[in-house]
């Protein structure tokens, strides 16, 4: 056997084994098991991926190929661990275009030192053995026995000829395991894996492995449109499109709409004294007691504007005339988007223009100062002082959408913003309430519906500081909200305005090396997918609506399961605008009941209610005690409908179904 042939064998095994060990390590950390459910498929896929080292006659090109593959998996490995540690998410190829934003908002607290050490171990192991190989091959260059390139190519053909039949057998097992599934029925194995990789990310990761997941996600990204896919979308949109009317339809016709997405807003930060404006709106308005949301900020924004979401770019001429701003433009509204950040962050300026907002106001509208993304966020009060008159204009029928920033986090106790809050008296107000026994830090509160978790006393003090930082930031937002309410009242528009407040996601940021604060608050230390950790604030308020709802229901509490997906159809319903209900994930609140609004998280690629958490269809990771089969069957039925609908929405945006303006 020639020396070159042996070297190719070494490079092949070297790459395949390091990727296999990384896959096992990631699986063990995230899912507490060494191997994916279909480990043979994972090993075969790794071997097929490593086999191109035999295609290059010169070792230098084989080494370059190996380095590219290894570097990619290093990035996927460390980002997956970082995301899992902080948010329960894992890396996706779709996140590559968000690299700039990720770097801007990342802090040292995002990284667990042990995970970094794991990555360093793999890098050192890989590079040291590769360097040794290079040095050894150079030393033996003159002694090398000749090897025919045909033998090397034959090895590539051999691996393919063995690997593909084994892969076929693994595919056969997958098809047999899913042949009774209502979701995967009649799908071939590649379709099953592809669907899981793009609709149920973590489940695909756990079942099929690291390499299989990324291979199939890539396959989906490069697939092409077909007439069959267009027909699927056409049939869906034309199937019973008319929305039902109800007792609230058109009751708020021609009213203004002010939607505020409050960064990281959770109900535990709403307090009668500390956040009086939030408290009043929540108390008098429609208070949603079972609202869930878990998506990245830009996705939660889109949900509150489109009533659906997308996984592909929307800034290339889409005619989304069903969006709330587009619908209200046609109805004669002045539409505007507001956010105290750069317009290029998440490509918001272009995206909001395409969605339909005639006007867009960002940080550079009033200031040339640099934005600090590491926790010293701009005050919401400052932004409202500068653009409040644009947000609630006089003598105009308006729709304004504001994404706040003050409560973004992380929540460090030594930041400049903390000192400013102290100077403005926020901490004095908080401490006075605390000393009077009228405010208790969330980490010290008794939450009987959550499990108890033992926390070290020194960690408790750090957590107390973080909760207090978050609370004073919510106080700043509340003050800004009060400024807007005052403007509406001064303009005589308060009674004629629908105010919608909702949170994009939980307050997951942390500092001082601790896990995200939600894990301590909700008792999720065992990595259990506990759905109530994703509880977020939602309130819809208008004096006329509040009175109508109270008269009909005896109070203004909304106890059914909800999410931000209900916002757009509910507003259209209240305003009495005709719309095709099939464009929206959920129905109007007033056409909803029971489990109609089970939630799909584009970030976690999971489906959950406040009582059940699925990472795949009927692959339940959590369910509340005492649930009966009636509830579970209804949940699974709604999940099935929802996932099929989400898949159609994804096709709409991916294949530019809406055409160009």
Image: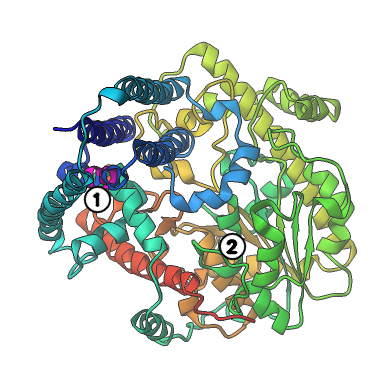
Badge 1 or badge 2: first in the primary sequence:
2
Q: How is the image coloured?
A: rainbow
Residue 377, given in percent of the width and then of the height, sits at 74, 38
Relative placement, left or right, of 626 versus 483 is: left
Q: Residue at x 69, y 80 (%)?
A: 253
**On the image, which quarter does residue 219 sit in?**
bottom left
Q: Is residue 603 visible?
A: yes
**Element type at marker 1?**
strand
Highlighted magenta segment, given as a residue range: 46-51
Q: Could you say which quadrant of the image residue 539 lies in?
A: bottom right
> Picture coordinates of residue 228 (x, y %)?
33, 82
Residue 534 x/y as whole percent: 47, 45
**Total label count?**
2
Residue 525 image label: none
Q: Which residue is mark 1?
A: 619
Circle 2 — which element?
Answer: helix
Helix, strand or loop: magenta stretch: helix
Please, is residue 606 above or below residue 258 in the view? Answer: above
> Which residue is found at the position 47% from the left and 39% from the top?
87
Which one is in front, 374 or 24? 24
Is residue 592 visible to the viewer in this orientation of the structure? Answer: no
Which part of the image, by quadrant, shows the C terminus?
bottom right
Q: Which residue is mark 2?
A: 302
Q: Is residue 72 above or below residue 519?
A: below
Q: In this picture, is 525 found above or below 54?
A: above
In the rendered view, tell whether residue 649 sits above or below residue 195. Answer: below
Q: Along the horizontal axis of the image, is 461 left or right of 348?
A: left
Find residue 204 and report its horizontal and vertical position in percent: 29, 50
């Amino acid at each position: 056997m020639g020396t070159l042939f042996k070297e190719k064998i070494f490079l092949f095994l070297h790459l395949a084994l390091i990727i296999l060990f990384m896959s096992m390590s990631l699986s063990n950390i995230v899912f507490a098991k060494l191997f994916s459910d279909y480990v043979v498929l994972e090993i075969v896929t790794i071997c097929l991926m490593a086999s191109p080292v035999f295609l290059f006659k010169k070792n230098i090109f084989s080494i370059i190929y190996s380095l590219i593959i290894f570097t990619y998996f290093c990035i996927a490995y460390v980002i997956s661990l970082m995301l899992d540690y902080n948010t329960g998410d894992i890396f996706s190829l779709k996140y590559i275009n968000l690299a700039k934003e990720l770097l801007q908002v990342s802090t040292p607290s995002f990284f667990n030192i042990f995970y970094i050490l794991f990555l360093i171990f793999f890098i050192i192991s890989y590079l040291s053995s590769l360097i040794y190989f290079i040095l050894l091959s150079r030393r033996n260059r003159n002694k090398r026995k000749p090897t025919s390139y045909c033998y090397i190519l034959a090895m590539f053909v051999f691996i393919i000829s063995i690997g593909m039949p084994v892969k076929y057998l693994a595919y056969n097992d997958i098809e047999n395991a899913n042949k009774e599934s209502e979701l995967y029925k009649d799908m071939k194995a590649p379709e099953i894996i592809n669907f899981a990789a793009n609709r149920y990310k973590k489940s695909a990761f756990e079942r099929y492995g690291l390499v299989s997941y990324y291979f199939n996600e890539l396959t989906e990204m490069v697939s092409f449109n077909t007439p069959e896919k267009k027909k699927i979308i056409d049939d869906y949109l034309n199937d019973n499109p008319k929305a039902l009317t109800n007792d609230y339809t058109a009751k708020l016709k021609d009213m203004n709409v002010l939607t505020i997405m409050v960064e990281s807003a959770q109900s535990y930060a709403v307090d009668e004294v500390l956040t009086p404006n939030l408290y009043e709106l929540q108390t008098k308005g429609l208070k949603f007691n079972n609202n869930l949301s878990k998506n990245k900020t830009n996705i939660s924004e889109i949900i509150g504007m489109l009533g659906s979401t997308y996984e592909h770019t929307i800034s290339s001429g889409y005619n989304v005339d069903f969006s709330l701003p587009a619908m209200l433009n046609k109805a004669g509204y002045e539409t505007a988007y507001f956010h105290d950040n750069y317009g290029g962050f998440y490509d918001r300026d272009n995206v909001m223009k395409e969605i339909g907002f005639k006007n867009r106001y960002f940080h550079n509208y009033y200031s040339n100062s640099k934005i600090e993304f590491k926790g010293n966020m701009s005050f919401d009060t400052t932004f409202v002082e500068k653009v409040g008159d644009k947000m609630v204009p006089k003598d105009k029928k308006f729709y304004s959408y504001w994404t706040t920033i003050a409560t973004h986090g992380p929540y460090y106790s030594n930041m400049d913003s903390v000192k400013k809050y102290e100077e403005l008296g926020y901490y004095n107000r908080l401490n006075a309430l605390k000393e009077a026994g009228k405010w208790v830090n969330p980490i010290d509160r008794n939450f009987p519906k959550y499990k108890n978790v033992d926390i070290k006393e020194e960690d408790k003090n750090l957590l107390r500081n973080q909760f207090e930082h978050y609370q004073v930031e919510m106080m700043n937002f509340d003050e800004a909200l009060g400024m807007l309410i005052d403007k509406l009242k001064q303009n005589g528009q308060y009674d004629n305005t629908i105010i919608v407040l909702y949170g994009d996601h939980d307050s997951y940021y942390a500092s001082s090396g601790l896990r995200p604060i939600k894990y301590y608050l909700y008792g999720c230390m065992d990595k259990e997918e506990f759905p109530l950790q994703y509880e977020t604030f939602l309130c819809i308020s208008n004096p006329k609506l509040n009175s109508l709802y109270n008269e009909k229901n005896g109070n203004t509490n909304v106890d059914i399961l909800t999410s931000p997906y209900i916002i757009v159809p509910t507003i259209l319903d209240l305003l009495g605008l005709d719309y095709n209900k099939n464009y929206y994930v959920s129905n109007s609140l007033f056409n909803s009941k029971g489990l109609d609004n089970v939630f799909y998280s584009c970030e976690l690629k999971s489906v959950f209610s406040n009582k059940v958490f699925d990472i795949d269809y009927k692959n339940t990771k959590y369910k509340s005690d005492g649930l009966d089969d009636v509830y579970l069957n209804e949940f699974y039925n709604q999940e099935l409908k929802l996932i099929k609908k989400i898949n159609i929405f994804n096709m709409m945006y991916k294949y530019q179904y809406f055409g160009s303006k």
